Image (cartoon, rainbow, N blue to C red):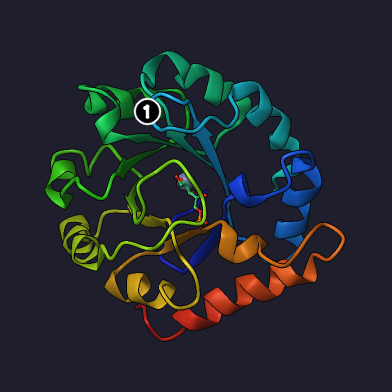
Amino acid sequence: MSFDRKIKIAPSILSADFANFGQEIRAIEAQGADWVHVDVMDGHFVPNLTFGPQAVKAFRPHVKTVMDVHLMIAPVDPYIDAYADAGADVLTAHIEAGPHIHRTLQAIRGAGMKAGVALNPGTPAEAVAHLLDLTDLVCVMTVNPGFGGQKFIDMTAKIRSLRSMIGDRPVHIEIDGGVDPATAPLVTEAGADVLVAGSAVFKGGSVNDPTVYGENIRKIRTATEGTWT
Ligand code: DX5
Ligand code: ZN
């Protein structure tokens, strides 16, 4: 995985057909997805339950781009090796998930993955001030995590602060929640480069009608043109 700040669209398979993940992943990649975003929820850190490392390992052979695994679980540390074994390229943990995020990020890198740290809407940018040399991605939640299809919460001031704190470091800013063609340019203009989108990518399409996914991805990408440097 090489680093750049070009806009990357990362469809969240939380909005895919749960009986058909392999085909859905192949369809979104064929239609222009840059990364594949995988939402792991434990019914404890967030009030919803999705899948665990065995399922993520089964997704791996279908993902030709970057498998971006977003852990909404607590605790995180006992599962890091399982997600490395599952083939995650990026493994993101929430700063709110435990008292030792510094240790968690070191362990994620130590297991050979890129380390991401996610911030809930109520958590300030300054919470990562002493973590920026330990992390490869900061995920700014623009919804309260747990469900797809929620309304975008404006976090542009937080994104701007992060962008300035990050400076020249090779750290991605990822936005997760309520990203669509209307909200995407707000966050890229503020400094984000990875856009997670679930409902806005999958709506109206299916594996039998995958060109809709492509149109939806293009609409988001086009909306961001000219907003980033
Ligand atoms: C929310 C998840 C998101 C979700 C985004 O807890 O982390 O990745 O799938 O879905 P949309 O794009 O529908 O808000
Ligand atoms: Zn997510």
Query: Where does the C terminus fall, quadrant-wise?
Result: bottom left
The reply to whether the residue tagged 1 has its Cβ within 8 angstroms of ligand 1 is no
Viewer-closest of 211 and 171: 211
> Taking 73 as reference, is 12 left or right?
right
Image coords of residue 68 (percent x, y): 52, 43
| Mark 1, residue position | 45
Image coords of residue 161 (percent x, y): 16, 61
Q: Amino acid at mark 1?
A: Phe
In this view, 57 is above or below 186: above
> Taking 187 as reference, is 128 left or right?
left
Q: Residue at x 32, y 30 (%)?
A: 105
Q: Residue at x 36, y 78 (%)?
A: 228
In this view, 71 is above or below 148: above
Q: Residue at x 40, y 24 (%)?
A: 44
Q: How many marks?
A: 1
Which quadrant holds residue 82? top right
**Most distant residue in the top direction:** 78
> Taking 31 as reference, is 15 left or right?
left
Check disc 1: other Cα within 10 Å, few if <14, some if 14-19, many if 20+: some
Image coords of residue 47 (percent x, y): 43, 32
Image coords of residue 196 (percent x, y): 49, 57
**Most distant residue in the right direction:** 208
Secondary structure, mark 1, is loop
**Most distant residue in the bottom direction:** 226
- Residue 135 seen in the figure: yes
In this view, 179 is above or below 147: below
- Residue 65 seen in the figure: no
